[in-house]
């Protein structure tokens, strides 16, 4: 890591913000799973860009602003025609991106539009771990989706996640309770984001997104809480054969659309992002 990079991120400490947590109710997840539907959330982590998202001709996310994490939507299994327009330019115009998405039953995932380590807009699909946690425990997942170098995540001043790079994630089980956490440059005590108190309730999975841009001094945290981990969910178990294996292959194919469309998304978002930075 260069001296310039460290100075850039260190200078953002005073400008960082902590977004309010978005909780995913256990009832919403269990209902979707019992009905054989998918549960899908979308996180918008590209600063300075507002879009409208359409699915099968219907406006799904109007005026979708940076820093927004949607509540999980129970979706029927099937194929969805997704169109993304710059804010106010749809649905009769030419979409900036159009993609058919196969949504399998039982999937629990979050799609994140964010910046890569170099500051270029990109799209990443994350599968949310809804497996059971032990009594008295909680799951903590940290996702690095910021234009920033490698970081360590500390809880109570001690590193619990080391050398995390964009766009990777790290999960661990920890004792339930309130934890004071911050994000520092990897291998240093230089705070990039935080500190912030995280309420890790028993039987929940808390996902923390580190997003924004170090260069633009707008690094921030966003948290997502998924409940119901204290009992085994009715999700799709990987490694099964027959129908289960078919569902897992469908889930993989669905998540793969983000990689296939990343270049198209990046082209749109990069132009809009650079225009916003130039204003």
Image: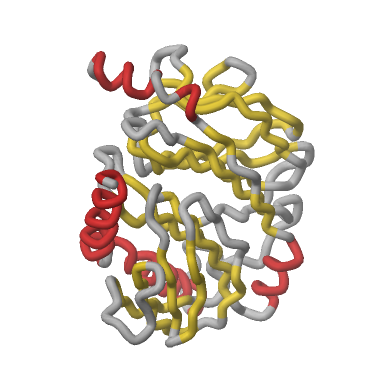
Q: Position of residue 271 (x, y in %)?
A: 22, 56
Would you say residue 75 is visible in this rendering?
yes
Seen from the viewer's position, the closer of residues 214 and 244 is: 214
Q: Position of residue 181 (x, y in %)?
A: 60, 26
User: Which image quarter: residue 74?
Assistant: bottom right
Colouring mode (rainbow / by chain / secondary structure / one colour): secondary structure
Q: Identify the residue shown where x is 50% and y is 31%.
A: 16
Would you say residue 152 is visible in this rendering?
no
Q: Position of residue 150 (x, y in %)?
A: 35, 28
| Residue 24 in the figure: left or right of residue 118 | right
| Residue 240 in the figure: left or right of residue 233 | left
Q: Identify the residue shown where x is 72% and y is 36%.
A: 199
Looking at the image, how many numbered discs can be counted on the residues? 0
Q: Quadrant of the N terminus?
A: top left
| Residue 210 in the figure: left or right of residue 226 | left
User: Which image quarter: residue 12?
Assistant: top left
Q: In this rendering, is residue 179 above or below 123? A: above
Q: In this rendering, is residue 70 above or below 249? A: above
Seen from the viewer's position, the closer of residues 157 and 87 is: 87
From this viewpoint, which residue is outermost toward the front?
279
Q: Identify the residue shown where x is 56% and y is 53%.
A: 129
Q: Identify the residue shown where x is 24% and y is 49%.
A: 274
| Residue 59 in the figure: left or right of residue 269 | right
Seen from the viewer's position, the closer of residues 19 and 247 is: 19
């Amino acid at each position: 890591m260069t001296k310039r990079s460290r100075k850039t991120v260190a200078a953002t400490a005073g400008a960082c913000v902590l977004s309010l947590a978005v909780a995913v109710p256990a009832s919403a997840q269990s209902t979707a799973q019992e009905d054989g539907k998918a549960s899908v959330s979308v996180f918008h982590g590209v600063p300075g860009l507002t879009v409208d998202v359409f699915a099968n001709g219907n406006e799904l996310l109007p005026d979708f602003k940076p820093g927004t994490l949607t509540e999980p939507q129970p979706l029927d299994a099937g194929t969805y025609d997704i169109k993304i327009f710059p804010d106010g330019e749809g649905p009769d115009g030419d979409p900036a991106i159009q993609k058919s998405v196969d949504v399998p039953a039982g999937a629990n995932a979050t799609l994140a539009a964010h910046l890569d380590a170099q500051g270029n807009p990109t799209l990443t699909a994350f599968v949310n771990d809804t497996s059971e946690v032990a009594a008295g425990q909680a799951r903590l997942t940290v996702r690095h989706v910021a234009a920033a170098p490698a970081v360590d995540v500390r809880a109570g001043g001690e590193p619990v996640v080391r050398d995390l790079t964009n766009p990777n994630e790290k999960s661990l089980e920890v004792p339930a309770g309130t934890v004071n956490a911050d994000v520092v440059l990897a291998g240093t005590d230089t705070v990039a984001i935080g500190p912030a108190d995280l309420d890790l309730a028993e039987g929940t999975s808390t996902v923390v997104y580190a997003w924004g841009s170090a260069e633009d001094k707008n690094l921030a945290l966003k948290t997502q809480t998924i409940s119901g981990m204290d009992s085994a969910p009715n999700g799709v178990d990987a490694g099964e054969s027959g129908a289960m294996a078919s569902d897992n292959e469908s889930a993989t194919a669905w998540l793969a659309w983000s990689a296939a469309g990343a270049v198209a998304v990046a082209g749109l978002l990069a132009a809009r992002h650079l225009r916003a930075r130039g204003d």
